Amino acid sequence: MIQDELPAYVYDLGALDGHAAAVRAALPGIELYYAVKANPDPELLRVLARHVDGFEVSSGGELAHVRGLFPGAAVALGGPGKTDAELSADVTRLHLESPNELRRLLASGRRADVLLRVNLDVPVAGASLTMGGGATPFGMDPAGIAECVALLSGQSAVRLRGVHAHLASGLAAPALLELAAAVLEYARELGVTEINLGGGMAVSYADPDARFDWRSYGEGLAGLRRPGEVLRIEPGRALSVYCGRYVTRVIDVKRVHGELFAVVAGGTHHLRTPATKGHSQPLAALPPGEPVTIVGQLCTPKDVLAHRVPVRLAPGDVVEFTMAGAYAWNISHHDFLMHPEPGFRYLSPELAGRES
Ligand SMILES: *Cc1c(COP(=O)(O)O)cnc(C)c1O
């Protein structure tokens, strides 16, 4: 790596290809969509497209992006606060978030295949983010769903295909299977057979080698599924996070009131994840040393990429942050301080263009 070309995001498309193939193989009979908001990089999407059944998008912007790359792909459009244009988009599935969205859709007179996003009152323990199991702006409680079911009767333009639930993120397989069982029970009471169980599979920034147990999750889902039911999941982070690295170099090392700091090129305007999630971004191996806090170039104390990590760093050293393939570049505040953007490199680029 030429140091002047840093910072850069480096995406290992070969690793992504292998990981996505393994996830796919662990989920026989389950539909797999990729949640594009985790990372919409076109090269990553081209690799993922070879393994997934479709894409979950959360805006008209993501929809246009995916349509531009894969005109014929199955796409589910969700997200709270849809505009009229989003509600009338031509998609495989529309995930409705409120009775008012359904009223607007019905008033438009257009045809649509919909899933109703349900927020069940089930306990969600151990999650890093919760979108359900209590009062949140996402989806509908059972009363809202009942309101929708009543609105849907006596018309045929909007077809109720099933329910969608994305209740939490950061859950291990046993907890996600418990939620799945609750959602399936609810769907069966409602009398629908298509169930989208969402994403949210755990990844651990504290323990980068720990992986979500796709095999037991797949086996668990296979055990829960009844004949005639379509089960779909839409992971984002757990699919793409491992294939990305944010590579930069140390500009300065200094001691202030006894604490050691290494200032690297770039910062949280390129990789916001450690600042928002409050973790130290994991690092590729470096020689051991006195605990050092790795910060970026921004004039804010929040620009911390890793806190007191026991590694030895000197000006000019290259630092590689791992687990930067999801909610990293695309979730960051790029324009703050107007530093240059990072470069983007792809290992095994031929994979993105390969025929499946
Ligand atoms: C963000 C999101 C996902 C993906 O979540 P991950 O934690 O990245 O797996 C899936 N479905 C919906 C509705 C989402 O909002």
Image (tube, helix red, strand yellow):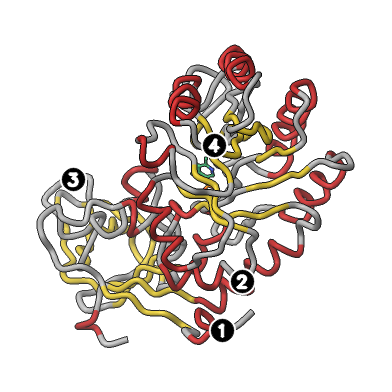
Determine contact: label 1, label 2, CB under 8 Å: yes
State yes or no: Cβ of the residue under disc 4 lies below 8 Å from any atom of ligand 1.
yes
The local secondary structure at tag 1 comes to loop
- Mark found first going from the N terminus, 4 or 2: 2
Q: Is residue 314 visible?
A: yes
The local secondary structure at tag 2 comes to loop
Which quadrant of the figure has residue 171? top right
Disc ID at residue 354? 1
**Picture residue at 59% right of the left edge, 36% below the top:** 114
Determine contact: label 4, label 1, CB under 8 Å: no
Determine contact: label 4, label 3, CB under 8 Å: no
Q: Which residue is mark 4?
A: 95
The local secondary structure at tag 3 comes to loop
Spot occupied by residue 39 in the image (x, y as percentages of width and height):
43, 59
Q: Amino acid at mark 4?
A: His
Disc ID at residue 301? 3
Distance Cα–Cα, label 3 vs label 2: 42 Å
Distance Cα–Cα, label 4 vs label 1: 32 Å
The local secondary structure at tag 4 comes to strand
Spot occupied by residue 115 in the image (x, y as percentages of width and height):
61, 35
Is 83 on the left-hand or right-hand side of 241? left
Q: Amino acid at mark 3?
A: Pro
Q: Is residue 238 visible?
A: no
Spot occupied by residue 309 in the image (x, y as percentages of width and height):
37, 58
**Mark whose residue sits in front, 4 or 2:** 4
Which quadrant of the figure has residue 9? bottom left
Q: Which residue is mark 2?
A: 50
Q: Amino acid at mark 2?
A: Arg
Distance Cα–Cα, label 4 vs label 3: 39 Å
Determine contact: label 4, label 2, CB under 8 Å: no
- Mark found first going from the N terminus, 1 or 2: 2
- Mark found first going from the N terminus, 4 or 3: 4
